[in-house]
Image: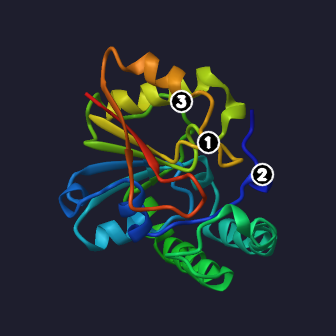
Amino acid sequence: MSFKLESVVPWGRNLNEYMQMFNLSNDDLLKKIAGFGDGPASFNYEAKQKGGSVISFDPVYQFSNKQLQKRIEEVRTIVMQQMRENMDNYVWTNIRSLEELENIRMSAMNLFLSDYECGKSENRYICHTLPEKLPYDDNYFDIGLSSHFLLMYTSLGYDFHIKAMTEMLRVCKEIRVFPIVDLDANITDMINDVIDYFKNRYCVEITETDYQFQKGDNKLLIIRK
């Protein structure tokens, strides 16, 4: 199935949010990290500035800087209107207003765009779609991260999520998936089945994070070898 830019809703998060979402320490930032579904996040760029080593994987990296910039502007108003209509689903503590949210997201995405061409030339942004096999050896990465993708899009089905996490675990010594809620902010109905599938071969835990924006999204799934 072809992947079309028109289906993409780019919405980037920054380094500080990644560190809170995934309980990342400063020492973690110095490890080999794989980001799955990073999209236009500034995490990769900001981590590099701190001496980190991050490779981001996302099918949107097949598109050019201009194409992504255009798409960001196309969906910006739509996304903010949706946020305005659903404000009660969010916790307005760390992010205090819609205006602050828009500034944070646009700042992250603009940093990404400023780094995109350089990052592609350095193989830090790689076009890839899970659960396809990654061009890396087993255990190449220390940590694999999935932000607002796996477990959230339940319509992709249980088999997709199992295959995607299995490939992540092939190349990563540990994976962290945030959040564990679906698109309606309910605990995803497949979480118990996913845990049951992996718990006999890996150490599996759910832990709280310091990050909560969508109500109920302060839980992190960790699977490690």
Nearer the N terminus, badge 1 or badge 3?
1
In terms of image quadrants, where is residue 159?
A: top right
Q: Say few, some or many: other residues with alpha carbon within 10 Å of mark 1 (under 14 / 14 to 19 / 20 or more).
A: many
The answer to whether one can see residue 172 in this image is: yes
Relative placement, left or right, of 151 versus 76 is: left
Residue depicted at 60% across the width and 26% down the height: 160
Residue depicted at 32% across the width and 66% down the height: 47
Nearer the N terminus, badge 2 or badge 1?
2
Residue that mark 2 sits on: 7
Give how far across and how far down residue 193 sits, in percent: 53, 20
Question: Residue 77 shows which numbered tag?
Answer: none
Q: Amino acid at mark 3?
A: Ile
Placement of 87 over or under 185, stated as above or below: below
The answer to whether one can see residue 71 in this image is: no
Task: Between label 2 and label 1, give the one nearer the viewer.
Answer: 1
Q: Quadrant of the C terminus?
A: top left
Give how far across and how far down residue 19 sits, in percent: 35, 62
Placement of 143 over or under 10, stated as above or below: above
Return the residue nearer the eye: 225 or 130. 225
Q: Say which element carries label 1.
A: loop
Task: Between label 1 and label 3, give the one nearer the viewer.
Answer: 3
Q: Amino acid at mark 2?
A: Ser
Residue that mark 3 sits on: 191
- Residue reaching furthest to the left: 27
Residue that mark 1 sits on: 152
Residue depicted at 46% across the width and 72% down the height: 115
Placement of 4 over or under 165, stated as above or below: below
In terms of image quadrants, where is residue 61?
A: bottom right
Q: Say few, some or many: other residues with alpha carbon within 10 Å of mark 3 (under 14 / 14 to 19 / 20 or more).
A: some
Q: CA distance from mark 1 to mark 3?
A: 10 Å
Q: Amino acid at mark 1?
A: Met
Q: Say which element carries label 3.
A: helix
